Amino acid sequence: MPIRPPSQCPDLDFLKRVHSEQKLSDKVRYKKVCIQPVFSADVDRNTIDSVPTSLFGDEVTVNIDKCNEVDIPKCMPVKLHVPEPYGEYNVSHLIFGVSTTFDRLDDEVGTFAHWLSRPSGDGAKLIALITDYSSHRENEIRKLQKKFRKASINIDLVKPIDDSYTTSQSHFTVLSYMLNSSSPETQWYGLLDDDTFFPRGLKPLSDALAKLDHTEDYYVGALSEDFRAVSTFGFMAFGGAGAYLSAPLARTLGSQLHKCIEEAGHTEGDIIIRHCVYKNSKAKLTILPGLFQQDLEDDVSGFFESGVQAINFHHWKSWYKEPVVPMAAVASYCGDCFLQRWRFGVDTIFTNGYSIVKYLYDTDYLDLNQMEGTWTNIAGDFDFSIGPLRRKLVPDEKKSYKLKDVEWSDNGDFKQLYVWRGNSKAKEADGIIEIMWQR
């Protein structure tokens, strides 16, 4: 039988693309699961529902270059209860500011688009202060701004107010531009790090802030999860989680901008904001549940596999590396189902958008209400914020299939590809589970 070209194996097109991009083993062990969602407003997001069926078994070995030589079993159907997709919402009352370099901003247009893109025009505004603005020609700046606006992002690119200011000082001065670009409808001003990411878009943040009175002075954010960082830098809104100022407080700080910088000196932008708030108002830090500084290093799987309903992520391309945009893409399919968990059989946990983990033992021996302490800087300094933590499992105790990519079908189906890396030295085939969320 002649070997068909790849285009003649349409059911494997997604697998073949990811296989090439991820440089997977020549042969892979593959299985496809079709999720038939049951949308409901009554889903308890904190409950891990059990599915008696195992996610494993009936895998086939596929040689990507010889796709005609294997019969792919019929997609395994599974019904899962998930929250309803988000309806229409307006976040034009929010405005954000970041301070960053031209190249860092250019690299992350798609990342910003995930949470800022609003073709309908009812999105939030972003002011991006480019610290090396003077090193780039005006046509480069315009081209970058056009790239953002083509992605339906309402953005202004601005230069530093004072070239002598440090990046941290410029981080605070972007507030001046934000005030000039705001409208009477603007309720909240968010000062962010350039790698602050909102996986479920801005609705969760908007809903959380709506519980506070934006006509009063409010200084909102989150502490670091690491008590050592809090001990070092103090009680303040850490920048990765964002510092959110109500409109009247933002105006007060804007009028004292340069004075606050002079008084605070050469220090971190987060500290300048805190200093200015406490010197010029009676507002004190309001901690908003769901915001995270994410001061976690290296392996952060325990954080994500806890099913956390995070409003934001941070440090995702520095302290740890995760493909946050593909991970969070499922939020546009079923909203709060991102990182929702299900137990399959007795030994497997599916964390939607992050991983499928097969444990060595029955999961009953794990306290799945506790976060697994997987990161390297753990010590005992995280219990006050995200503890108590359970011990980190050794590699033999869990087999993890991690999400690598996603794809939308023309008919509206949403596909995720989860990959387990085999031992290449032993010529062990990589494992692939394709999850298709059906419309």
Image: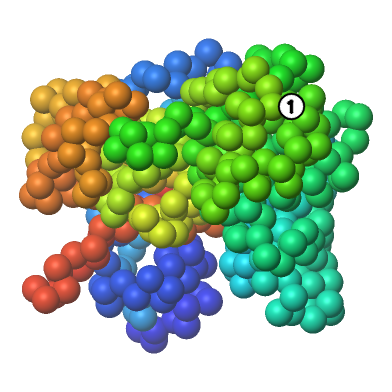
At 55% from the left and 23% from the top, the residue drawn is 285
* Residue identified by numbered label 1: 249
Residue 286 in which image quadrant: top right
Q: Residue furthest right?
A: 184
- Colour style of the rendered protein structure: rainbow
Residue 149 in which image quadrant: bottom right
At 41% from the left and 76% from the top, the residue drawn is 20
Q: Nearer the viewer, residue 196 or 250?
A: 250
Look at the picture and state if 294 lies above or below 146. Answer: above
Number of other residues with Cα within 10 Å of mark 1, as a class: few under 14, some 14 to 19, many 20 or more: many
Compared across the picture, whether 349 is left or right of 209 comes to left
Q: Residue furthest bottom?
A: 2
At 37% from the left and 34% from the top, the residue drawn is 230
Q: Residue furthest front?
A: 263
At 87% from the left and 45% from the top, the residue drawn is 181
- Which quadrant would the N terminus be assigned to in this image? bottom left
- Which quadrant would the C terminus be assigned to in this image? top right
Q: Nearer the viewer, residue 113 or 294?
A: 294
Q: Nearer the viewer, residue 6 or 386?
A: 386
User: Can residue 127 be seen here?
Assistant: yes
Give how far across and how far down residue 295 sits, in percent.
37, 44
User: Can residue 333 be seen here?
Assistant: no
Look at the picture and state if 196 lies above or below 209. Answer: below
Q: Secondary structure at mark 1?
A: helix
Look at the picture and state if 226 lies above or below 290. Answer: below
Give how far across and how far down residue 119 sits, in percent.
82, 48
Under mark 1, the amino acid is: Leu
Give how far across and how far down residue 66 sits, in percent.
34, 79
